[in-house]
Amino acid sequence: MNTKLLCIHPDDDMLVALADLQDGEQAHWEQEQITTVGPVAAKHKLARRDFAIGETLKLYGVPVGKATQAIRRGEAISTANLAHHAAEVSLQSTEPYRWNAPDVQRWQGQTFDGVVRSDGRVGTANHWLVFPLVFCENRNIEQLRKAVERPLGYASDDLAAYTLSLLGEDMQAPPRTPARPFPNVDGVRFITHAGGCGGTRADARALCKLLAAYADHPNVAGITVLSLGCQNAQIAMFKEALAAQNPQFDKPCLIYEQQASSDEASMMKAALQDLLKALAEANNVQRQPVPLSMLKIGVKCGGSDGFSGISANPVMGLVSDLVVGLGGSSILAEFPELCGVEAELIARCEDPQDQQRFVSMMKAFEEQAQAVGTSLAENPSPGNIRDGLITDAMKSAGAARKGGSSPIVGVLSYGEQLKRAGLSLLCTPGNDVESVTAIVASGANVVLFSTGLGTPTGNPIVPVLKIASNSAVATRLADMIDFDCGPVLQGTPLPQLADDLLGLIQKTAAGQYQSKAERLQQYDFLFWKRDISL
């Protein structure tokens, strides 16, 4: 086999270039020989036959576009000759889905050292969380951050050395990070955001629901909340969301309202003093062995390239299947990047109501996009297109492989909680941070994030492992990449890398491995605001 070409699915109308091909170069896939018509860049696709205008082209075995001009055999597929096209979605009756579950014998009986909360839920970290109900308090949140992170040993000296290195200076004796007085508290994490007022009450309620989910997350020991007082997202609204999230919520909840305080300094002093007392209590938590069935992973992609759907995403899909096979949970998000593979996902839904819900959510998302003059077809970014993802359907067909092949046990709206173990679909936009923010709110305790171009995305309370689709980006951006799936392109079996990745997840969940995003202190939070500002 010529290693310069790859056929993903036998029904595909395109082959993937694994390396740059010159005009007139002869390349082979098994017994199939093709002479290129013009250059074809690595990660891009070339036509397996001649196509007339209007013909549908398949990739991953599904329609991904229609020819907008005649395409010759061996010619590169591009935005100049292919437009987005996906198969029509219908709710026809289907046979019960049969899943060929993976062999999980190797992992049976294995554990990770998790943080077990009073209700039995398991976290992969023990954080204290500080956030505002409104953007007016962001400055005070930052003041608390400055007062806490370095004195309590939660700020990385690596960042100071990094700053000096950018200035061309060496840090001969970096300031010593103080010993942590609360060693069992993995971090004091701070959220700022642009919401809470100025928009609609619906957006304020959505924000409170999301913050309540973070407060209730098993990775969180307790919360400090700052409120101004006059905003839409009132303290009462947040408490109502918290009670709806968990009527038995029993974590420390420290709330301070600036307009009800004598002055800012008094409020900040009280918040800091109370926080230190609460951290002493949170420090009593000890990790303990728990089964791998307590893993709840989220799978996400960002900065994708033409190799993402060939290497990183299918490896993550196998990991998703392993976790589900062990009794754990997996969350597949990004509805704009499921456009074109709806039929497969519908067939995998165990409950007919989930089939209907998924179709309704997808249609509503498209209608919302059209209402503001756009469509799901505009999802691929310039970077995606430059690296071989020409249409949204093409991008989606590869992106969906993150979800493996297990049955779908739930379809969730943005910020909605996991209802049962297994694979769930979560309605989020493709935006990296808006999506990861919701995946964590739904209950994920480890997030897997594939990338072909590189992205620093992280999260305040849950580790985000960055999975590279190719070794070049894994080497060049080693400061942000945790795992390299590039060896797939050189013939390493997908299951071998899936086993290795699950081993890294196990170490991460046990606190034995710190993700690159955490080392960079990349703690991103962005909620999906869907209404106008008033």
Image: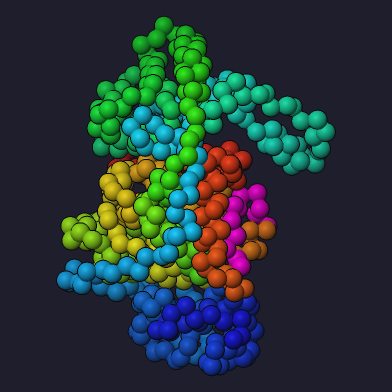
Closer-to-camera residue (44/327):
327
Report the residue that reaches farthest toward the top: 262
At 65% from the left edge and 49% from the top edge, which residue is drawn?
479
At 60% from the left edge and 29% from the top edge, which residue is drawn?
154
Residue 15 counted in the magenta span: no
- Residue 268, position as x, y percentages in the image: 48, 14
- Residue 453, position as x, y percentages in the image: 57, 60
- Number of numbered callouts drawn: 0
Image height of 335 relative to 520, above or below: below
Closer-to-camera residue (109/279):
109
Closer-to-camera residue (389/440):
440
Image height of 265 relative to 415, above or below: above
At 27% from the left edge and 56% from the top edge, which residue is drawn?
409
Is the C terminus in the top left, top right, bottom left or bottom right quadrant? top left
Q: Is residue 139 left or right of residue 237?
A: right
Q: Is residue 488 left or right of residue 404?
A: right
Closer-to-camera residue (2/510):
510
Q: Which residues are magenta?
A: 476-487
At 40% from the left edge and 48% from the top edge, which residue is drawn?
293
Instruction: Name which quarter of the figure residue 400 lies in.
Output: bottom left
